[in-house]
Image (spheres, rainbow, N blue to C red):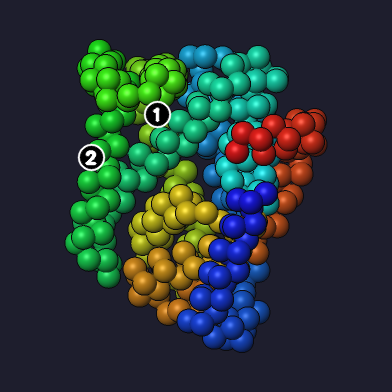
């Protein structure tokens, strides 16, 4: 509850800061002229995105358990609505709990595997953002680009060591262990590192599977970029699709920042920062698109989430209790 309260206060602060940079009446006027024709492709793309990610999760878990694709599609809907209203990664935890209760997978590992699935998102985001930032003109300075490049290299290196070089990783752990003086800290260190390396072994897959998961992730972010593209079209503005793709990648990195329930404040602030600060889109137009996108997303998440909860016959009370406890 403290985390949720803190995130809510942060969201209110971000909304206030955002409102100081835009003309709210102008934003409302722009949204009032929305072309409803483009809302259909937006909703279809919003549905396609979690379906693609469900296919990736099915491939991701295939070595462990055969999971129904339909269940994973609806499970993404449950996770989306929980993350929307309880943005402390409760949705990812709930996925792990569902896999534990319905498919008898180890609870701890299930939760870690779900976060590793999201980790694939993070790797692809860093990789594509590093490439696009060198190809697409932006107002970002070379320092930001270099930081993203360094993050990519370090993340890929650590992932490679954890997945494919277990002997070398073990030597690093053995070297670090004596530096932990207290006995109980060493015990927890041993348990934690052993658990992490064991969980990361799920990524030790055939190159074909890994390539397919990466391609699905690239496609998923292309679908997400299409949502922004059509959202701008609905407001009478045609944007460069690759810029929208890069914008979605940069937006994904902002998910690491704490968010208020409903992503109030964080969505508007990050959207303005990316679209206006990085690509030079007018502050009012950028904010109008983000507010419109936020409203459409809220409607979609609510409908998709409730249908998913009903379809999976989830005991939401039990899921919430466990999710909040672990989150």
For residue 153, which numbered disc appears in the image?
2
Instruction: Find residue 289 and report its horizontal and vertical position in percent.
Output: 53, 70
Viewed as shown, does residue 182 lie left or right of 151? right
Viewed as shown, does residue 239 lie left or right of 294? left
- Residue 72 in which image quadrant: top right
Query: With respect to residue 81, does 194 lie above or below?
Result: above
**Residue 289 versus residue 15: which sits nearer the camera?**
15
Which comes sooner in the sequence, label 1 or label 2? 2
Instruction: Find residue 17 and report its horizontal and vertical position in percent.
Output: 51, 76
Crowding at label 1, few (<14), some or many (≥20) Cα neighbours within 10 Å? some
Name the residue: 40% across, 59% down: 247
Q: Is residue 93 visible?
A: yes
- Residue 168 in which image quadrant: top left
Say which residue label 1 marks.
212
- Disc tally is 2
Which quarter of the rendering shows the C terminus?
top right
Q: Is residue 38 visible?
A: no
For residue 271, which numbered disc appears in the image?
none
Kindly report the distance in space between the C-alpha atoms of the residues bearing marks 1 and 2. 21 Å
Callout 2: helix, strand or loop?
helix
- Residue 126 in which image quadrant: top left
Callout 1: helix, strand or loop?
helix
Name the residue: 51% across, 75% down: 18
Name the residue: 65% across, 69% down: 36
Instruction: Find residue 292 and report its horizontal and vertical position in percent.
Output: 60, 68
Query: With respect to residue 281, does 44 lie above or below?
Result: above
Instruction: Find residue 54 and report its horizontal and vertical position in percent.
Output: 56, 33
Name the residue: 59% across, 83% down: 24
User: Which dot, 1 or 2, sits closer to the camera?
Assistant: 2
**Residue 158 versus residue 216: which sits nearer the camera?**
158
**Residue 242 versus residue 27: which sits nearer the camera?**
27
């Amino acid at each position: 509850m403290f985390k949720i309260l803190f995130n809510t206060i942060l969201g209110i602060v971000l909304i206030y800061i955002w409102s100081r940079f835009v003309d709210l009446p102008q934003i409302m006027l722009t949204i009032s002229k929305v072309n409803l024709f483009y809302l259909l492709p937006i909703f279809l793309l919003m549905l396609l995105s979690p379906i693609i990610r469900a296919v990736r999760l099915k491939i991701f878990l295939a070595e462990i358990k055969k999971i129904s694709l339909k269940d994973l599609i609806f499970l993404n809907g449950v996770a989306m609505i929980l993350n929307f209203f309880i943005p402390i990664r409760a949705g990812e935890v709930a996925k792990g709990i569902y896999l534990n209760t319905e498919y008898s997978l180890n609870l701890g590992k299930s939760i870690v595997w779900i976060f590793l699935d999201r980790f694939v998102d993070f790797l692809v985001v860093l990789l594509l953002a590093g490439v696009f930032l060198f190809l697409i003109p932006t107002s970002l300075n070379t320092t930001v680009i270099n930081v993203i490049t360094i993050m990519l290299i370090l993340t890929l290196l650590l992932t490679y060591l954890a997945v494919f070089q277990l002997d070398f990783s073990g030597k690093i752990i053995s070297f670090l262990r004596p530096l932990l003086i207290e006995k109980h800290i060493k015990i927890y260190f041993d348990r934690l590192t052993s658990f992490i390396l064991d969980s990361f072994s799920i990524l030790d897959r055939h190159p074909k599977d890994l390539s397919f998961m990466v391609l699905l992730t690239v496609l998923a972010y292309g679908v997400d970029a299409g949502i922004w593209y059509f959202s701008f079209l609905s407001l009478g503005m045609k944007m460069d699709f690759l810029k929208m793709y890069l914008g979605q990648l940069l937006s994904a990195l902002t998910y690491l920042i704490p968010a208020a329930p409903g992503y109030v404040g964080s969505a508007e602030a990050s959207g303005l920062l990316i679209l206006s600060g990085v690509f030079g889109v007018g502050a009012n137009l950028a904010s109008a698109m983000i507010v419109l996108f936020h409203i459409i997303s809220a409607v979609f998440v609510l409908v998709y989430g409730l249908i998913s909860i009903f379809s999976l016959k989830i005991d939401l009370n039990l899921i919430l209790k466990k999710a909040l406890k672990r989150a």
